[in-house]
Amino acid sequence: MLKLKQDKLLDEEALTVICEALHVNNQDITDIDIMKKGMTNRSFTFRCKGKRYMIRISGVGTEKLIDRCQEKEVYEAIRDMDICDPVIYIDSEKGYKISEFLENSRVCDPMNGLDVKRSMECLKRFHDKKLAVGHAFDLFGQIEKYELLRGNSKSVYADYEKTKRDVYWLKSFIDRNIEEKVLTHIDAVPDNFLFVKDEYGKEQIKLIDWEYAGMQDPHVDIAMFGIYSLYDREHMEQLIDAYFPEGCSKRIRTKIYCYIAVGGLLWSNWCEYKEKLGNSFMEYAPHQYQYAKEYSYIALLKLQEMERTLHA
């Protein structure tokens, strides 16, 4: 039987899901341990018949944030491409996901230039596949959705309405400068780039956790990596250069500034909803709001500069 400590880590429903997915009995499940408590989910590792697995369990309120049917569609689209960790089971109703645990792995260090370069190369290769699914991730629509989830509560930021107007002012420029929409990760943050050593000691990169993914401008993923990493302006520029080693035009760079602002407002609202449910994100939450304020201003200045150049 499972140890008492392990019984408390996973409830009966989760244990049943594992047994049914792997066609085993309770006594086959051992060494259960907490892997991480993420912003959206909780993850646990366990062993079954000598092999190590991971199970993801949805966090409180996640059903209002994630469409698990859409997530399942994404995993179907990438299933045979060796892009992510091997998914064994996914429940589109309750959000359980079981995958093989990738041994000898580490996440991307956002302050390591080589890690970032390799991660952006991986991201670009994925975008270049131009995969498609039947749903999109609507940045501005999601902002409105997260606002509604706050109910009658106003934002904790006194100047929220002004900041929102500044960010929304960028929408027309964004819409005019989207070259294409492809399957985009949306949550392409350093923690989701997994560097896995093979039997020869060579590291391969897997991009994991696709629950927010949908059709979108792939350049959104660059902005999301930067704002999650809490990058300053210098590191943001280095990040963009890592994705575009051939050089990035002013127009595209300015669009990415816009996405930094939009992403900041998006995740700031996301944090406000989750914090109402008892979660705390400490420095992450106010940083996201600051990105909305700072980069909407930076983008505006760049747009004005381009306008002056156009009419010079």
Image (tube, rainbow, N blue to C red):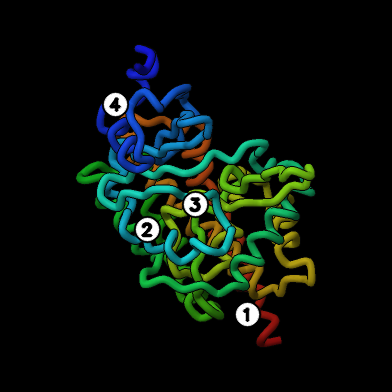
**Mark positioned earlier in the residue sequence (4 or 1):** 4
Residue topped by disc 4? 11
**Which label sits on residue 307?**
1
Callout 3: SS: helix
Alpha carbon separation for disc pair 3 and 2: 26 Å
Residue topped by disc 3? 264
Callout 4: SS: loop
Name which residue lies at 48% across and 46% down. 289
Q: How busy is the neighbourhood of tag 4: few (under 14 within 10 Å), some, or many (20 plus)?
A: few
Nearer to us of marks 3 and 1 is 3
**Disc 1 marks which amino acid?**
Glu
Horizontal side, residue 183 vs residue 191: left or right = left
**Disc 4 marks which amino acid?**
Asp
Nearer to us of marks 2 and 1 is 2
Horizontal side, residue 32 vs residue 145: left or right = right
Residue topped by disc 2? 72
**Disc 2 marks which amino acid?**
Lys
